[in-house]
């Protein structure tokens, strides 16, 4: 039972290679297919074998859990994506205009409607639904990255030049086709449950539709895209309706079992995905030898990217009574060992808090080696045994669609429409906060948080929408949503301007017991460590280079750590980074054939 489908994909590669041989990388290549199609489309087992290959399009076990590394505002890192480095990215840098996955999907869809397909209609439609889900998943990544792209609904033949080299279709066309695919998938995928949440069910279709429509609705609203067939409100309604299909089904619920690591972190710490909350998961399995490497990434100085939370984001975690951390006087001077007290339980389940232990021993953030320079060391996706560090042997699985996202999608869509009721708030945001130990989270907010408005979202005036954004950032931390959220809310400037601040310390050149266990953890100094100093082992040099760790004087008292960069974060004034450029080579290829492919704004 534990050898779930994703773990079995590898053994079918040889079979699949026999069934179909195809050459395809992008829209401009002449595709040729050589296969006995009846071997694929003549039996359900042939369809199942081919369809298994689609799951390779999902995040891999090795990458799930840090897709946001170098792509977000609220987590510091050693190296940002070149997309955010001044002058480092241009039309010749973009290399992801790849369409091979779409070819494989369309080949399958074409075959299902060919004379070679002799399975029963219900079986055929089930596999068509699966393929169309993956087509929508493929196009969602293209929509968020490039905006308008060509919609291709079949395998191109070498004589279809006008279709092969057509210009980009409108956002209206893309979103309409995606909705059509996902509606078909919801109506025709037979499975309503899956072992380990490792394969598609009809609920995956409703979930992806809610995600897709919420993105496009808010993108249209906050980027002032008008004159389209589908208004922002039209798509907010589609998002809410799709989410409500899952909510009203009663098939899923929030995990409330705290286990050893807390009800929230439990979702990311087990080999078997949580059956209550996981709708689709990337699965690992020690028995089958399918592993991930979260510990290696988050705990290694040499392998990882030094991802760690900014204190600017840590400030957004509420107290358990529902009050705001930033409403108290001198909140910026509260030291690490005290700032976790009576806070949202997710804070101590996302980063190493004062009570955190590794292999049974107290363990603070690894600041000295650059693993977590702000002092907020991420643990959400890793395991609490150091035997997993510096190796790729993590066996914990990672959900990629879960019920909490659906509740957030529903709440946001309804709030944007001005239709979120008190009861709906309580059953969505209130329920998520209740799991986090927040006692007074089930009442619709009536006051706007001035810290959130000033620091994150100056354009938001509705306290309900503000609190939903707070909740979304915390609940879905580092699960791959943040950059898409910043793009759709037109908040890209946070990438450059949100400070990567760290823990507060009272003084330099003084040993610090950061977690209050009676043992000194750090000695911060502007000087290089002397060989004979008694605190050599815990010495952390600050303020020595323009790029790196600084201790900045706090306006009230003491110092705040900050990870500074020289030119490592750039958001252009013309906002070009809301979309990626169409690769220059692709535009030239079109021109060579006598066709025109339009470029995204300000990337000329």
Image: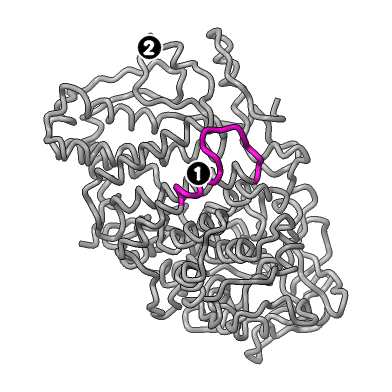
The answer to which of 475 and 125 lies nearer the viewer is 125
Residue under label 1, please give it.
234
Which image quarter holds the N terminus?
bottom left
Residue range in magenta is: 222-239
What residue sits 27% from the left and 42% below the top? 52
Residue 372, x across and y down, in percent = 64, 66
The answer to which of 369 and 349 lies nearer the viewer is 349
SS under mark 2: loop
Q: Is residue 299 magenta?
A: no
What residue sits 33% from the left and 37% below the top? 132
Which image quarter holds the C terminus?
top right
In the rendered structure, the answer to whether residue 334 lies left or right of residue 438 reads right
SS under mark 1: helix
**Mark sitting on residue 158:** 2
Relative vertical location of residue 113 with respect to residue 247 in this rendering, above or below? above
What residue sits 74% from the left and 78% below the top? 327
Residue 386 visible in the current orientation:
no
Residue 537, x across and y down, in percent = 69, 77
In the rendered structure, the answer to whether residue 499 lies left or right of residue 64 reads right
Relative vertical location of residue 200 with respect to residue 37 in this rendering, above or below? below
Relative vertical location of residue 363 with respect to residue 176 in this rendering, above or below? below
* Quadrant position of residue 581: top right
Q: Residues within 10 Å of mark 1 (few under 14, many from 20)?
A: few
Q: Residues within 10 Å of mark 2 (few under 14, many from 20)?
A: few
């Amino acid at each position: 039972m534990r050898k779930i489908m994703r773990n079995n994909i590898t053994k079918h590669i040889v079979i699949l290679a026999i069934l179909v041989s195809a050459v395809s990388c992008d829209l401009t290549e002449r595709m040729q297919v050589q296969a006995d199609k009846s071997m694929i489309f003549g039996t359900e087992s042939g369809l199942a074998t081919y369809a298994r290959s689609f799951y390779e399009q999902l995040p891999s076990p090795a990458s799930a859990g840090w897709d946001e590394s170098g792509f977000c505002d609220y987590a510091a890192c050693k190296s940002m994506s070149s997309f955010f480095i001044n002058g480092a990215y241009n039309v010749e840098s973009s290399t992801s205009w790849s369409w091979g996955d779409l070819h494989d999907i369309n080949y399958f869809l074409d075959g299902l409607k060919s004379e070679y397909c002799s399975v029963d209609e219900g079986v055929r439609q089930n596999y068509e639904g699966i393929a169309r889900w993956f087509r929508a998943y493929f196009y969602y990544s293209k929509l968020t990255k490039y905006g308008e792209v060509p919609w291709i609904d079949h395998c191109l033949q070498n004589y279809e030049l006008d279709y092969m080299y057509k210009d980009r279709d409108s956002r209206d066309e893309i979103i309409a086709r995606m909705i059509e695919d996902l509606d078909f998938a919801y109506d025709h995928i037979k499975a309503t449950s899956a072992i380990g949440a490792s394969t598609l069910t009809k609920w995956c279709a409703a979930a992806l539709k809610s995600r897709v429509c919420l993105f496009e609705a808010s993108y249209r609203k906050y980027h002032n895209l008008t004159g389209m067939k589908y208004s922002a409100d039209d798509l907010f309604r589609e998002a809410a309706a799709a989410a409500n299909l899952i909510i009203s089904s009663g098939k899923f619920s929030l995990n409330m079992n705290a286990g050893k690591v807390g009800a929230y972190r439990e979702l990311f710490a087990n080999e078997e995905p949580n059956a209550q909350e996981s709708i689709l998961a990337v699965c690992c399995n020690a028995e089958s030898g399918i592993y991930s490497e979260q510990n290696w990434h988050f705990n290694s100085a040499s392998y990882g990217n030094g991802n760690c939370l900014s204190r600017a984001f840590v400030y957004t975690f509420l107290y358990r009574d529902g009050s705001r951390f930033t409403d108290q006087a001198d909140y910026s001077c509260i030291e690490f060992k005290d700032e976790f007290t009576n806070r949202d339980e997710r804070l101590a389940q996302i980063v190493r808090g004062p009570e955190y232990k590794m292999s049974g021993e107290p363990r603070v953030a690894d600041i000295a080696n650059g693993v977590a320079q702000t002092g907020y060391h991420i643990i959400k996706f890793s395991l609490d045994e150091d035997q997993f560090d510096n190796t790729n042997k993590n066996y914990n699985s990672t959900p990629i669609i879960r019920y909490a996202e659906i509740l957030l999608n529903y709440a946001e869509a309804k709030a944007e429409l001005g239709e979120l009721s008190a009861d709906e708030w309580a059953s969505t945001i209130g329920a998520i906060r209740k799991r986090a130990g927040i006692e007074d989270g089930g009442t619709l907010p009536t006051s706007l948080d001035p810290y959130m408005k000033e620091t994150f979202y100056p354009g938001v005036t509705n306290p309900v929408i503000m609190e939903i954004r707070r909740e979304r950032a915390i609940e879905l931390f580092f699960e791959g949503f943040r950059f898409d959220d910043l793009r759709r809310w037109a908040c890209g400037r946070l990438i450059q301007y949100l400070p990567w601040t760290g823990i507060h310390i009272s003084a330099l050149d003084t040993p610090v017991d950061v977690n209050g266990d009676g043992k000194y953890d750090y000695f911060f100094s502007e000087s290089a460590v002397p060989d004979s100093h008694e605190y050599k082992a815990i010495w952390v040099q600050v303020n020595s280079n323009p790029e790196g760790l600084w201790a900045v004087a706090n306006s009230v008292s003491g110092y705040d750590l900050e990870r500074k960069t020289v030119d490592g974060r750039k958001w252009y004034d013309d906002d070009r980074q809301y979309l990626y450029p169409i690769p220059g080579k692709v535009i030239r290829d079109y021109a060579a054939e006598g066709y025109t492919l339009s470029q995204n704004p300000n990337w000329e």
